[in-house]
Amino acid sequence: MIEQKAAPVVADRPVSVPLWRSRNFALLWGGQTVGELGSRISGVAVPLLATTTLEASVFQVSLLSFLTWLPYLLFSLPAGILADRIDQRKLMIVCDVVRMTLMLSLPLVAFAGHLSLWYLYVVVGVGGVFTVLFNVAYKSMLPRLAGPDRLVDANAKIVMSQDFAELVGPTVSGFLIGLVGTAQTFFSNGVAFLVSALTLGLIREEPRARAEDTEDGGRVPLRAEMTEGLGFIRSRPILLSILACTTTSNFFVIAKSSIEVTFLVRTLHASTLMVGIVFSVSAVGGLAVGAVAGRLSRRIGTARIIWVAMAVPGPLYMLMPAARPGWGVLLYGLGLAAFSANVGLYNIAATSYLQHITPAPLLGRVNAAFMWVCLGVIPLGALLGGALGSQLGLRTTLWICVLGTWSASLFVLFSPLRTMRDMPAEGE
């Protein structure tokens, strides 16, 4: 479910000016919004392309999800080193250009009659690697553009863009597929990555301190450098608690996600339209929280809100396994909306805390270490959901998953965060 003490970070506008009027942040935010929408479009189009055009089996389609998440496990730590050592903005532009090329190649190869399932696997896998690089770089670049006093607001706006894309992306994808065909839909993804690259190219900022600028003498061995982010997290009890909370939550959330469509269709007998309504309702929760995240953080406390966001909505998760056929299906949507609100608020607060206390030259590796651990458990969670669903039944498995998700809050509830109201001015 996720996401300075060193050289001072200076925003490109005074804090009193609204963040959306900050030119550099507005460019990053706009590009990210378009890019997120493109990702949600391809999230529907890729499995449909495999299923309808390439006639892939259920297992072959599931490999696409596996290849999407595998790069986080394999490349997150090296990506952190790269993001700390080279120009992050240029790295993100390269990632966008490569992903644009990959997406545009799909309709062209299909038109030439050479599209195959293996080619789709290559596109998804290689694209996943550059997505990891892009995400590590942008999470590390964001604090410089927003400034330390506006981190929560900046992260809230990014999360709102993600929830907006989740709300409208599948609908736009379905419309485009019906209008121009599945393969041709990927032209829209190429345009989305092009827009993101162009907005990044317009950003202007002062040169930043990099990892090599802080070394005394020889270069740190590669293995030590790759694990430096993990070492920083281990030395900070609060970060370690946040990582444990996020990882546990992700594990059970993915287990739930792997069976929820099957539960809606086979147990609750929901129509395709009703399934779409359920997921649209859930996205509203994240959008609503993103709009008020800054005010909630100031009222509750920028540190306290981390455990509040995880613990308080938990009882509403029970609406998901308690849902029944007919209009009772909407109970699942309400429970999912509560979870979406939790995810949005928690991710905003936890990511802002991480960015606030991590020295700027180390931020890429710390972000990468977080992604390596908390996203690396996703394939295991999916396997657990399928195994338990087969052995215990879908409703029983959902009860286990929602209780497991809520239990993740114990890591932050019984941590030093419980006695804090706001983020520290410096360090922990």
Image (spheres, rainbow, N blue to C red):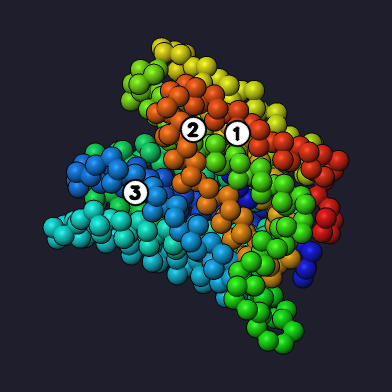
| Residue 256: assigned label | 2
The three-letter amino acid code for the residue at tag 3 is Leu
Name the secondary structure under disc 1: helix
Which residue is identified by label 1? 405
Q: Between marks 1 and 2, how big is the CA–CA gap? A: 9 Å
| Image position of 300 with respect to 80: above or below | above
**Disc 3 element:** helix
For marks 3 and 2 on the same chain, the one whose residue lies earlier in the sequence: 3
Q: Is residue 88 left or right of residue 276?
A: right
The image shows a total of numbered marks equal to 3
Label 2 element class: helix
Front position in the image: 63 or 215: 63
Task: Mark 1 or mark 2: name the one nearer the start of the chain.
Answer: 2
In which quadrant of the rendered image does the C terminus lie? bottom right
Residue at x 38% of width, y 66% of height: 98
Contact flag, marks 1 and 2 (Cβ < 8 Å): yes
**What distance separates the C-alpha of mark 3 from that of mark 2?**
18 Å
Local crowd at mark 1 within 10 Å, few (<14), some, or many (≥20)? many
The residue under label 2 is which amino acid type?
A: Lys
The quarter of the displayed image where residue 191 is located: bottom left
